[in-house]
Amino acid sequence: MTSDLALPIADEALAGRLLGRMAVVEEALAGHVQSRAPFVTAAASHLMEAGGKRFRPLLVLLAAETGDRAGSDEVITAACVVELTHLASLYHEDVMDEADLRRGAVSANARWDNHVAILTGDFLFSKSSELTAELGADAVRIQARTFTRLVEGQIMETVEPGPDEDALAHYLDVVAGKTGSLLATSALYGARFGGASREVEQALTSYGEIVGSAFQLSDDILDIASESDESGKTPGTDLREGVPTLPVLMARASTDPADARLLELLALDLGDDDLHAEALDLLRKHPAMDEARAYVLARAAEAKALLAALPDGPVRTALESFADVVAVRTT
C-alpha cells in the first residue's frame, strides 16, 4: 500500500489516508501551475511532471495527522504551498548551477534558457504566495520568513567563509536555510492547520528543520559514496565542481600527515578525470565518511527525540521512519 509514498508506513489505515490526500494534492498542483499562456503552463509544469519524492507535502499531511483536522482543505492548500515553493527554488537553483538535468529530465534552463527558467521560478513563487494568502496572515508571515531564509541560504552558498569563520559552521548554516527552513515550515503548516496542540506544533517545527538539514547532508554523503546504478546520480559531481560538502569539509579539517595527498587534491580543480578519480577514491576510504554518516545519524536521532511530545502510535512511528529514511537513504 505504501509503494506510492516516499517512505514506508506500516499502518495500512494511515498509509491509505496519506495516499488519498497525496492524490488530491497532485491534482491541485496540476491546476495551480496553469496559466492563461500555454507556454507558461508548459514551463511551469516541466519539473513537476518530472516527478520527485514530494517529501515536503507528504510531511505536511503527516504532521496534520497529529491534530483533529487532518483532512481539512487548509492542509491540502498548505501542502501545495510548500511544494510550489520548492519547485520554484529548483528552477532558480538550476540556473545558478548551470545544470542540464533535474530529476532525470532536461532542466528548464537547458530546454529553454536562463530567462525562461528564472521567470518560471518567479511565476511559481507568485502562485505559492497566492495560495498562502488564502491561509491567513500568520501563514503569510511564516511563508515570508521561510522565503527569506531560503534565499539567504542560496546567497550564502555562493560566498566563501571569512578567514576567521569556521567553514563547516558556515556550510551547516547554509544547509539550514536552503533545505531545513522549508521542511520546518512543512511540519509547522501541517500541525497548525491540522489542529495540533502548540506543544506538538513546536516540536514538529524543530523536527522538520533537523530532518531537512539531514536530507541535504545525506545527499552530500551519497555524492561520494554512491554508485551511479544505485543512486541515479554521477558519483562525485559536487566534488568535481568544487562544491564544499559535509565529508569534504570534515576531511579538510584533518591534520594527519597521511592525508597530505587528499588535502592537496581537494585544493585543486578536479575537472581532470584522473585527479577526480583519485580524490574520490581517497575520500571514500577516509574516516571523514564515517564521521559524516555518524553526524547525520545523530541529527536524525535528535529529530526523533523531539517526537516525545507526540503520543505513541502510527503517526509518531511514521515520523520516526521519515527521519530514518532521510538519514540513511541511497537515492
Image (cartoon, helix red, strand yellow):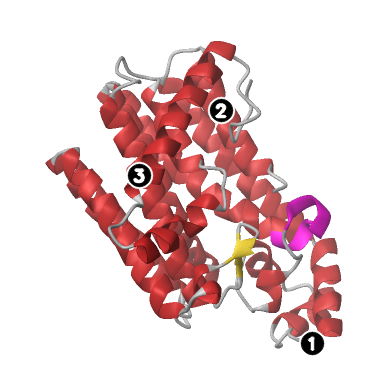
Per the image, label 2 sits on a secondary structure element best described as helix
Residue at image position (31%, 63%) is 37
Visible residue check, residue 82: yes
> Is 104 contained in the magenta span?
no
Instruction: Please tell me which of labels 1 and 2 falls first in the chain.
Output: 1
- Residues rendered magenta in the picture: 223-232
Residue 320 marker: 2
Q: Mark 2 near mark 3, Cβ–Cβ under 8 Å? A: no
Please provide percent x and percent y for residue 138.
Answer: 16, 41
Please provide percent x and percent y for residue 218.
Answer: 64, 51
Instruction: Give the CA separation, mark 1 to mark 3.
Output: 45 Å
The residue that label 1 is drawn on is 272
Please provide percent x and percent y for residue 300.
Answer: 57, 39
Per the image, label 3 sits on a secondary structure element best described as helix
Q: Amino acid at mark 3?
A: Gly
Q: Is residue 186 above or below residue 234?
A: above
Residue at image position (47%, 30%) is 23
User: Where does the N terminus fall, quadrant-wise?
Assistant: top right
